[in-house]
Image (spheres, rainbow, N blue to C red):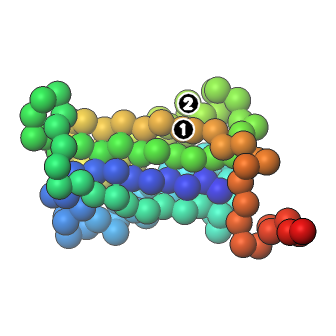
């Protein structure tokens, strides 16, 4: 945990330094002190068709999914760190946003934490 899903315009996804953006988001989440570095997942989803303010304008939005349990201040600081990391790597992109979303622990499972079925 967390899952940081970077949504962006296709032009940004095709940027030659996109790996640096992925690493910057990982480093920002790690620097929050809320997670173990090995547990942070970052992935990118690009869109060919989109409008920002009714126009064809590049954008980046991070949906950061975390297990519930952090307070609003921690989530706000995490969102700010992630936005700052994107702005530093892509200073020309005006539409940059982040939402930190809580996931209910009872509704989350992963391979190494499978509950006994049956």
Q: Residue at x 73, y 60 (%)?
A: 109
Q: Give the image quarter of residue 113.
A: bottom right
Mark earlier in primary sequence (1, 2): 2
In this rendering, position of residue 63 left or right of residue 9:
right
Rendered view: 118 above or below 97:
below
- Residue 9 on image: x %, y %: 21, 51
Circle 2 residue:
76
Q: Residue at x 17, y 49 (%)?
A: 49
Rendered view: 60 above or below 48:
above
Q: Residue at x 12, y 29 (%)?
A: 54
Dot 2 crowding, Cα within 10 Å, few <14, some 14–19, many 20+:
some
Q: Residue furthest left?
A: 55
State how many labels appear: 2
Residue 31 visible: no
Q: Residue at x 57, y 38 (%)?
A: 101
- Secondary structure found at label 1: strand
- Residue 11 on image: x %, y %: 15, 58
The answer to whether the residue labelled 1 contacts the one labelled 2, judged by CB atoms less than 8 Å apart, is yes
Quarter of the rendering occupied by the C terminus? bottom right
- Residue 56 on image: x %, y %: 10, 40
Front residue of 118/80: it is 118
Q: What's the CA distance linking mark 1 and mark 2? A: 8 Å
In this rendering, position of residue 52 left or right of residue 111:
left
Dot 1 crowding, Cα within 10 Å, few <14, some 14–19, many 20+:
many
In this rendering, position of residue 117 left or right of residue 78:
right
Circle 1 residue:
100
Rendered view: 115 above or below 103:
below
- Residue 104 on image: x %, y %: 72, 42
């Amino acid at each position: 945990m967390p899952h940081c899903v970077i949504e962006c315009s296709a032009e940004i996804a095709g940027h030659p330094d996109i790996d640096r953006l992925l690493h910057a988001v990982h480093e920002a989440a790690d620097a929050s002190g809320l997670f173990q570095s090995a547990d942070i997942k970052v992935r990118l989803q690009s869109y060919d068709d989109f409008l920002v303010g009714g126009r064809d304008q590049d954008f980046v939005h991070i949906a950061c999914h975390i297990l519930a349990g952090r307070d609003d201040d921690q989530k706000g600081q995490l969102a700010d760190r992630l936005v700052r990391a994107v702005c530093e790597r892509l200073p020309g992109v005006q539409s940059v946003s982040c939402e930190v979303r809580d996931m209910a622990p009872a509704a989350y499972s992963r391979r190494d934490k499978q509950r006994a079925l049956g």
